[in-house]
Image (cartoon, rainbow, N blue to C red):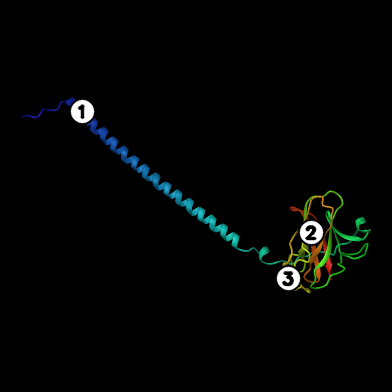
Amino acid sequence: MIPRQSSATERAEHAVALKRVKEVAVSEVEALDVRATARRSATVVVRLIQLTGASLILAACTASTTPTASASAAVPTSCGEVSNLVPNADFGGYGLARAGPVWFSAFGRVVTGKAVLADFAPGHPTKVVIHPDAGPHPEVQVRGIECASGRTLHFCYNQGDCGFTSQPVPESELERRGDAVVTIAENQHTDDTGYMLFARPGKYMVWVRQGTLLLGSVVFQVG
């Protein structure tokens, strides 16, 4: 049997079909290349995100565990001169030390003079009355430091004798017992009677803040 000869039209159609097959094949190969490239790019992006996250976590951990100079050691502070007493009518006109809306009474029956504590004894908590101002005032926080060392002054208010079972008390106990802050409620007009834990003689600064706003400070001479 003699094969039928393809006509010119058929040959032309076959050539077109082959060309189309080649174009489709090329398109599929290019699509595969694009998808492969996209997958590689996505993998790189994910890896970069993972590395960045790990770096941030490491940085955060390092920052939280590495002590700063201010946190690792107290710094001596130049507190300036001992504060002057101001007569207060609520205390019979006797002199008190004032910091913003807060007054401190611990200086004996004097009207004027310097804020020198009257009853300090080494190894013993020192009674200091905190007297909120008679007028309107915000909630405030009372804090303090020992000027010579920069160490935090601790307070025992609304805690009785702060848990001391015997006296005199070692300096190390006076430095760690009690609280680092006393909070005076908004428009509080009752006195807080308690103790400041002066570890040793010297100058101490006590300040009063409303949040981050400094309202006043006083410098006590202890001993």
Type of amino acid at the residue the image marks with label 3: Glu
Numbered disc in front, either 1 or 3: 3
For numbered disc 3, what is the local secondary structure? helix
How far apart are the alpha carbons under marks 3 and 2? 23 Å
Identify the residue shown where x is 57% and y is 57%.
Answer: 60
Q: Quadrant of residue 194?
A: bottom right
Numbered disc in front, either 3 or 2: 3
Query: Which mark sits nearer the N-terminus, 3 or 2?
Result: 3
Answer left or right for 50 relative to 193: left
* Outermost residue toward the left in this view: 1
Q: Local crowd at mark 1 within 10 Å, few (<14), some, or many (≥20)?
A: few
Circle 2 residue: 207
Asked if the residues shown at circle 1 and circle 3 are in contact, with their CB atoms under 8 angstroms apart, the answer is: no
Circle 3 residue: 173
How far apart are the alpha carbons under marks 1 and 3? 105 Å
Residue 44 percent location from the top left of the image: 43, 50
For numbered disc 1, what is the local secondary structure? helix
Q: Which mark is residue 12?
A: 1
Query: Which mark sits nearer the N-terminus, 2 or 1?
Result: 1
